Image: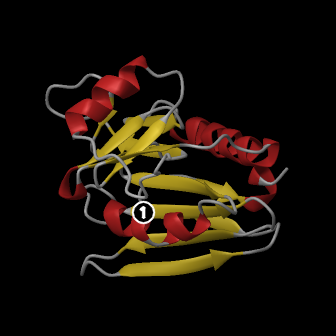
């Protein structure tokens, strides 16, 4: 008789990093668990590509670096490793000590919401992101409807929420000198 264990195997961060370097797939590391990241839909990828392009053109020649999907982020306070959809970092990029492949200082993070990740992206993930000292702005981009939710950190530590829902809407980013037109993102 085979008995299945309901408790997941627990890994150290070092175990995770060693396995991740050798893996062809991306995984998040949370609370000792290694969680596979699912592939995106064509609409998800289209929105991530459009956001990356708009940010790249808007920030070209300015002291920022833009990263998409495959750049690992370490969240020190919770010892979480994740791969945000899009990140903007004010130069210079700071790496986790002892690593050449893991950043720690995002200014802006954008996530394309999917049915399987929406609850996590809005809840626990955003809570963990907020512990990053450099983190100032969060964009949640809906893939099934024209909608961007923008969260901007205020000087008192509170987060201001703004919702953008029309093709004519302009998202004025606060953390970087870029304005995003929804008509350009959802083209």
**Colouring used for the render:** secondary structure
| Side of 33 where 51 appears, left or right | right
Spot occupied by residue 43 in the image (x, y as percentages of width and height):
80, 48
Q: Label 1 neighbourhood size at 10 Å, few (<14), some (14-19), many (20+)?
A: some
Q: In the rendered image of this protein, does residue 38 appear above or below residue 158?
A: above
In the figure, 20 relative to 156: above or below?
A: above
Q: Position of residue 149 (x, y in %)?
A: 60, 71
- Going by the image, does 173 lie left or right of 131? right
Residue ID for mark 1: 125
Q: With 152 as the anchor, is 179 left or right in this view?
A: right
Determine which quarter of the picture holds residue 112.
bottom right
| Residue 164 coordinates in the image, percent (x, y) | 68, 74
> Which residue is at 33% across, 76% downward?
154
Q: Is residue 67 visible?
A: yes
Q: For this rendering, which residue is in front, 69 or 152?
A: 69
| Secondary structure found at label 1 | helix
Q: Which one is nearer the viewer's eye here, 26 or 95? A: 26
């Amino acid at each position: 008789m085979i008995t299945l264990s309901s408790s997941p195997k627990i890994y150290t961060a070092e175990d995770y990093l060693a396995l991740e370097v050798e893996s062809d797939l991306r995984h998040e590391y949370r609370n000792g668990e290694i969680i596979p990241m699912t592939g995106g839909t064509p609409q998800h990828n289209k929105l991530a590509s459009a956001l990356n392009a708009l940010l790249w053109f808007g920030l070209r020649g300015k002291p920022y670096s833009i990263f998409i999907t495959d750049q690992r982020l370490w969240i020190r306070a919770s010892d979480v490793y994740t791969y945000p959809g899009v990140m903007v970092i004010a130069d210079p990029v700071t790496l986790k000590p002892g690593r050449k492949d893991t950043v720690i200082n995002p200014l802006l993070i954008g996530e394309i919401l999917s049915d399987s990740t929406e609850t996590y992206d809005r809840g626990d993930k955003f809570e963990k992101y907020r512990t990053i000292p450099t983190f100032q702005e969060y964009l949640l981009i809906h893939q099934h409807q024209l909608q961007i939710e923008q969260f901007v950190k205020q000087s008192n530590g509170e987060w201001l929420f703004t919702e953008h829902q029309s093709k004519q809407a302009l998202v004025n980013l606060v953390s970087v000198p870029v304005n995003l037109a929804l008509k350009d993102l959802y083209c």
